[in-house]
Amino acid sequence: MMNSFPSIEHLKHKRLFDELFSSGNRAFKHPVMVLWKEDDLSESVAIQAGFSVPKKHFKKAIQRNRIKRRLREAYRTQKAPFIDRLNLSGKQLTILFVVVKPDNISYEELQPKILLLLQGIEDAVFNAE
């Protein structure tokens, strides 16, 4: 159950995307940038996550969709310990993963980067207390 990525955890609202881009915290591990912000979400979930691949770097939809699938899978398999800690503290986050470099990105490259980014977010959120 913890390795699922249900619809309620998907970042969907334009307002939340705009807030992340305007006032969210940022971290970067080549080729992925993550934006995150502590937020009071209307749903009772610890995290809402979104994934973005710019059309500027990846012209074809099939390329963008493939990279988003890989990002979602890497996030889905690595999020459990992070969500457990957020649930214990009662905090809620919005997170947006953005691919910023036009490289041929494999799942094997993305998985450790997503883990490092999640650990960085965890350190920033819980060490700021």
Image: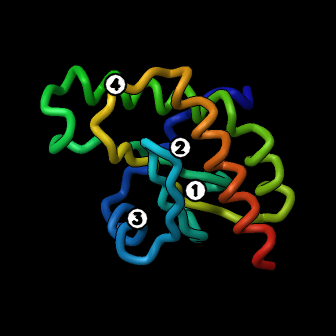
Query: What distance separates the C-alpha of mark 4 from that of mark 3?
Result: 29 Å
State yes or no: discs 1 and 4 in contact (Cβ < 8 Å): no
Q: Which label is found at residue 8?
A: 2
User: Which amino acid, mark 3?
Assistant: Leu
Q: Which mark is residue 104?
A: 4
Neighbourhood count class around disc 3 (C-alpha, 10 Å): few under 14, some 14–19, many 20 upward: many
Q: Earlier in the sequence, mark 1 or mark 2?
A: 2
3D distance between C-alphas at marks 2 and 3: 14 Å
Q: Position of residue 66 (x, y in %)?
A: 34, 22
Say which residue label 3 marks.
16
Q: Secondary structure at mark 3?
A: helix
Q: Quadrant of residue 86?
A: bottom right
Badge 2 element = helix
| x, y percent for residue 112 | 63, 33
Q: Position of residue 5 (x, y in %)?
A: 57, 32
**Looking at the image, is 16 positioned above or below residue 65?**
below
Q: In the image, is residue 124 above or below residue 48?
A: below
Foreground: disc 1 or disc 4: 4
Amino acid at dot 4: Asn
Instruction: Name the disc covering residue 43, or none.
Output: 1
Q: CA distance from mark 1 to mark 2?
A: 7 Å
Q: Are marks 1 and 2 in contact (CB under 8 Å)?
A: yes
The residue lying at 53 percent from left, 27 percent from top is 109
Quarter where residue 116 is shown: top right
* Among numbered discs 1 and 4, the one appearing first in the sequence: 1
Quarter of the figure that contains the N terminus: top right
Q: Quadrant of residue 20?
A: bottom left
